Amino acid sequence: MKARIAVLGGDGIGPEVTAVAVAVLRTVATRFEHQFEFSEALIGGAAIDATGSPLPPRTVAACRDSDAVLLGAVGGPQWSAPGARVRPEQGLLELRSTLGLFANLRPVRMLPSMLDSSPIKSEVVRDVDIMVVRELTGGIYFGRKKRTAREAEDVCSYTAAEIERVTRVAAQLAMKRGRRLVSIDKANVLETSRLWREVVEQVVRAEFPQLTLEHMLVDAAAMHLLRAPRTFDVLLTENMFGDILTDEASMLAGSLGLLPSASLGASRLGVYEPIHGSAPDIAGRGIANPYGAILSAALLLRHSLELAGEASAVETAVARALDAGARTADIAVSTQKALGSAAVGDQVIQYLQTDQ
């Protein structure tokens, strides 16, 4: 197959980890006889420095002209002054909105070889396999904003249509998994959450009666994620709650650097990125964990290019590399030598090139 992939390295460690993921995708193309064409474009702080905008029109055009987008990370202290009117994160939010990407998939899976790296007891995290579906273009991140010297306002708003469409995505995934869906809200306090709960209930009862649906308050969900994560299958959550809960859930897997994500809309075009930030403190040192970016590339293969076998091959190669001890410093244990980003990528590629 032929496919065009836009690569938005972004800031900090973003270009480093996406470079490793691109190398893995090139290996996939060679091994499975595909033709992948890569085009690089600017986003975030790097784009602000070069053009004054966190999402230049050329970047939007490159994304629209592609079958999928691989993204690194955005942000850094040099663009984060409290009074800054243009911020790197605005580019990411605008990209999601412009491309109509309303559903963010964040899988959280504990690999057996990573049990010793999780700060949570192994008996708690063993066999954890959760899919978090986060609504991506509504809520407080996209609501009306106001700021004066003595007052600030961020409005959280949702429409029934926004809730319906992301609920269907989560429910369809749950139907292919354990048929258990937990919807997260704060309905005891927030009107948006009360609407959220009502709409989720209506959609599931009418269209997915085979599912077991549970509603859970976000504070209770935060506790249960650490106390009994195996009780979860698919989690459905609004924008901000999902952002926070998936960062917490990364501790189940052992590190933020391990978790991928897929941002999807109504078409096949999606944006794929690790959930970690730009980590400016380690940028340029070649030590960042590339596994989240590599696994994001696997999601790209599965969802935008519909290459499920190739996606599974990448995921298997990652598991084999971790089993063999190929770890960066954030997930290495005392008996292991920490590898750099490129060396980890080389290990994954080595396993990818052999029969699975």
Image: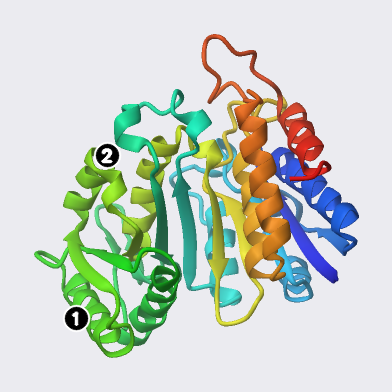
Residue 232: image x %, image y %? 30, 54
Give left or right: position of 174 versus 286.
Answer: left
The residue at the point 24 percent across, 71 percent down is 212
The residue at the point 61 percent across, 31 percent down is 322
The answer to whether residue 352 is visible is: yes
Q: Is 256 drawn above or below residue 87 in the view shown?
A: above
Residue 114: image x %, image y %? 49, 30
Query: Where does label 2 land, which residue?
Result: 226
**Residue type marked 1:** Glu
The residue at the point 42 percent across, 41 percent down is 250
Q: What is the secondary structure assignment of the residue under circle 1?
A: helix
Q: Earlier in the sequence, mark 2 or mark 1?
A: 1
At label 1, counting other C-alpha atoms closer than 10 Å, the crowd grade (few under 14, some 14-19, many 20 or more) is few
At label 2, counting other C-alpha atoms closer than 10 Å, the crowd grade (few under 14, some 14-19, many 20 or more) is some
The numbered mark at residue 198 is 1
The answer to whether residue 55 is visible is: no
Residue 88: image x %, image y %? 58, 52
The residue at the point 50 percent across, 38 percent down is 111
In depth, the one of 34 and 265 nearer the eye is: 34
